[in-house]
Amino acid sequence: MNFVKWIQNGIAHRRVAIYLKIIAILMLLSALTHLGSIMGIIGGTWMDKPLLFRVADMFLLPIGLVLAWGLWKSMFWAVVVWFAAVVIFQVIPFLFFGEFFASSAEEQTMHYGQVGFHAITFVIFFVLLPRMKRN
């Protein structure tokens, strides 16, 4: 069984589907924080924020909403997009270009914490998948 088939078959298991629903709720909450940021409810007015954060809000709001729906439905594409979104929008920017996103050591620590949180969620996902059958 190859890696893709293993994940496709694995997300059909009850424990993985429940876990994906939990991640979907977290994605929905993430999308709502981006909406709150755009509306000026979180962190002051949106126009006063750096351009990078405004662009991120505009990209991550719809991505978070679509991901929440797809993960809730246990769709394979949503798992792939979840992984890709975390790598593209958090791991690469925060680990390789962190000086543009963090103006203090506390903010940099927060970003590392976000990357660590996502790494832990992926490890839990792979642990919950049933064992891969060897040919």
Image (cartoon, rainbow, N blue to C red):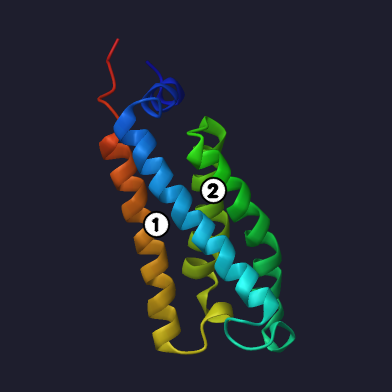
Give the quadrant of the N terminus.
top left
What's the residue at 64%, 69% (across, down)? 35
Which x, y percent locates residue 50? 67, 83
**Which amino acid type corresponds to the residue marked 1 in the rendered image?**
His
What's the residue at 35%, 62% (across, down)? 116
Element class at badge 1: helix
Task: Tell me the quarter of the picture where residue 45 sits.
Answer: bottom right
Q: In the rendered image, which residue does mark 1 sit on? A: 118
- What separation in Å lies between label 2 and label 1 (alpha carbons)? 15 Å
Which sits in the foreground, 15 or 102? 15
Label disc, if present, on residue 68 of the rendered structure = 2
Picture layout, residue 59 above or below residue 1: below
Give the quadrant of the C terminus.
top left
CB under 8 Å between discs 2 and 1: no
Which x, y percent locates residue 41? 61, 81
**Which amino acid type corresponds to the residue marked 2 in the rendered image?**
Ala
Which sits in the foreground, 102 or 16? 16
